[in-house]
Amino acid sequence: MAATVNQAALASRRRAAAGRLVNRASIHGAILFGAAFMVIPFLWMLGASIKYPDEIFTYPPTWIPRSIRYQNWVEAWQAVNWSRYFLNSAVMAVSITIGHLVLCSLAAYGFARTKFPGRDALFLSFLATMMVPGQVLLIPQFIMMRWFGWVDSYWALIVPSIGSAYGTFMLRQFFMQIPFELEDAARIDGCTRLQILYRIIVPLSVPAMTTLAVFSFMGAWNAFVWPLIVTTSEPMFTVQLGLSTFRGAYGNVDWGRMMAATCFITLPVIGAFLVGQRQFIEGITMTGMKG
């Protein structure tokens, strides 16, 4: 009788282990499928950048070119003033990223670690701005830039985007997880609010700060509509506007050169993500666990 019970228990454990294995295999399979679905367009873009024009749109598609044409990259770089466009995008993206880290950390600290009348109502009002579509603000912001005389300048590219309600919300959620005892001890030692923020809170929030930095840099680097509106001269174009200019330079689009140009303006974004990948994933995982 005991042997029968042991065999039944062993069979039950085996079925449970097999079920867990199937579940894990299903989850990993779904993740791999999603990853492949996301990567395939980038692989096609990279392959098309080194193909001859007559091979790019062949059906069925060829993933490995029959003959490689590296000249697409050289000709794409020489077609327009990419060095200037990269400089403009770098200045805009880095400035906006720094602005987000500084301003959002200050606002998030105020909402998370200080108490003042109307704090929660003000925070909800702050979050409500996230529901306003960005397109609604284009005309008012452009009128303001024109009043200030900032059209076609770095000021117009940077200042309207230097704050972020989402960044403030994300950092606030992370700051709330830090024990208040650390702040009390620092205050006893004579630290001011700013010293507590930048010597204690920020160093403990590196994952969240890195996540915000990656999001901010990617958003600023890939911006198209706002730079298109506020820049009127070619020397102030960003890489995204440069790509549209590059397309117009050839009439009938040379997709090999177009894909080559798309590849090298995508590299900084990929590099930014790879540099902060570990902290980025940790920040995404931990942010929002406490409300």
Image (spheres, rainbow, N blue to C red):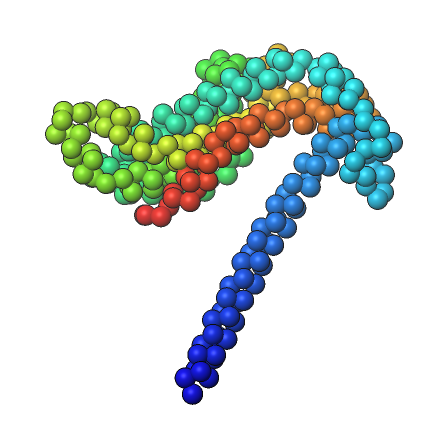
Q: Residue furthest right?
A: 54
Q: Where is residue 84 in the image (x, y as percent from the top left)?
A: 61, 13
Q: Residue furthest front?
A: 3
90 vs 279: above or below:
above
Q: Is residue 107 visible?
A: no
Picture quarter with the N terminus: bottom left
Q: Residue furthest bottom?
A: 1
Q: Where is residue 214 in the image (x, y as percent from the top left)?
A: 48, 31
* In front of the other: 116 or 229: 116
Q: Is residue 48 visible?
A: yes
Q: Where is residue 182 in the image (x, y as percent from the top left)?
A: 20, 35
Judge from the rendering whether residue 84 lies leftward or rightward of residue 146; answer left or right.
Answer: right
Q: Where is residue 91 in the image (x, y as percent from the top left)?
A: 51, 17
Q: Residue at x 62, y 28 (%)?
A: 266
* In front of the other: 84 or 17: 17
Q: Residue at x 51, y 20 (%)?
A: 92
